[in-house]
């Protein structure tokens, strides 16, 4: 049953991850809230959700997803608390934009390490824990980006990392089937503080310009992403290795 599942969401102290954590907690899943440095935000989310669903259904776990030892400790803690993890959402990610010719090794590796290597490490540690238990099935849902398919200026590191995530999704789907299904959700403009700040959407002309590129006429929400991911995890049985754009028609691959 869906309400028996345990889901671990990386980078879930704020933004999209926090919205997904709240939705899955309300649905009845046991949720592991992961954060790297945003402890205060993770604490606020944990407190708010514990008042709704009870602390027995939540776990807060610090881990830098690019550090295998920290990731192993996070999964060990989750298994100790809930005895298993049924679904992993690889949501943790960072942007460090800049012109290609000025991009430093640190800017390149920082984004690749978190967005791509972090997805690899978390997925591997999750999958290892399914070995020898054929009665269980699991899910990995990676969060991609449209710029992993078409690129953009000043984002060579980010675009390369998300292109890697999309192809990694297919590789894992082939290797981990049928026990673990692996899919990728590709958000568009989702209404988060990060998107509003990056595109300066407090200015009406910027907001209207962005909305003008979206056929559905609005920003997306974490609820929009949740509905698709919930279907992948709880409503489907024959889907793996696929990309799911959730962008209001902004980008049609």
Image (cartoon, rainbow, N blue to C red):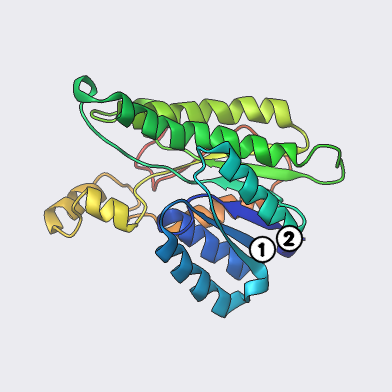
Residue under the image location 40 percent in, 46 percent down: 247
Residue under the image location 55 percent in, 80 percent down: 51
| Quadrant location, the C terminus | top left
- Which residue lies under the disc numbered 1? 30
The image position of residue 157, as x and y in percent, is 34, 28
Residue under the image location 49 percent in, 45 percent down: 64
| Quadrant location, the N terminus | bottom right
Local SS, label 1: strand
Quarter of the rendering containing residue 151: top left
Q: How many callouts does the rendering have?
A: 2
In this view, the residue farthest toward the bottom is 51
> In the rendered structure, which disc, 2 or 1, sits on the residue that comes first in sequence?
1
Q: Is residue 6 above or below residue 160?
A: below
Is residue 235 something that shows in the picture?
A: no
Local SS, label 2: helix
- Which residue lies under the disc numbered 2? 82
The image position of residue 102, as x and y in percent, is 19, 24
Front-lying residue, 2 or 46: 46
Q: How far apart are the two marked residues, 2 and 1, measured between alpha carbons?
A: 8 Å
The image position of residue 158, as x and y in percent, is 36, 32
Q: Which mark is residue 39?
A: none
Q: Are marks 2 and 1 in contact (CB under 8 Å)?
A: yes
Quarter of the rendering containing residue 68: top right
Q: Tell me: 192 left or right of 55.
A: left
């Amino acid at each position: 049953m869906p309400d028996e599942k345990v889901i671990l969401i990386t980078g879930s102290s704020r933004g999209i991850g926090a919205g997904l954590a709240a939705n899955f907690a309300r649905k009845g899943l046991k949720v592991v809230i992961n954060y790297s440095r945003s402890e205060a935000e993770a604490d606020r989310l944990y407190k708010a959700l514990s008042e709704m669903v009870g602390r027995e259904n939540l776990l807060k776990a610090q881990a830098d997803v690019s550090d295998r030892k920290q990731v192993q400790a996070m999964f060990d803690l989750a298994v100790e608390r809930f005895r298993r993890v049924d679904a992993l959402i690889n949501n943790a990610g960072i942007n460090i934009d800049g012109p290609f010719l000025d991009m430093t090794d640190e800017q390149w590796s920082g984004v690749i390490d978190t967005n791509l290597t972090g997805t690899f490490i978390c997925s591997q540690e999750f999958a290892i824990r399914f070995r020898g238990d054929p009665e269980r099935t699991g899910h990995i849902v990676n969060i991609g980006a449209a710029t992993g398919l078409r690129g953009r200026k000043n984002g060579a590191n980010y675009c390369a990392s998300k292109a890697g995530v999309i192809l990694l999704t297919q590789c894992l789907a082939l290797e981990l089937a049928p026990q673990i299904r692996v899919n990728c959700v590709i958000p568009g403009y989702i209404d988060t503080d990060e998107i509003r700040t990056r595109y300066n959407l407090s200015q009406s002309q910027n907001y209207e310009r962005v909305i003008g590129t979206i056929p559905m006429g609005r920003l997306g929400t974490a609820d929009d992403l949740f509905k698709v991911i919930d279907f992948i995890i709880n409503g489907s049985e024959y889907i793996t290795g696929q990309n799911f754009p959730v962008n209001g028609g902004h980008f049609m691959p």
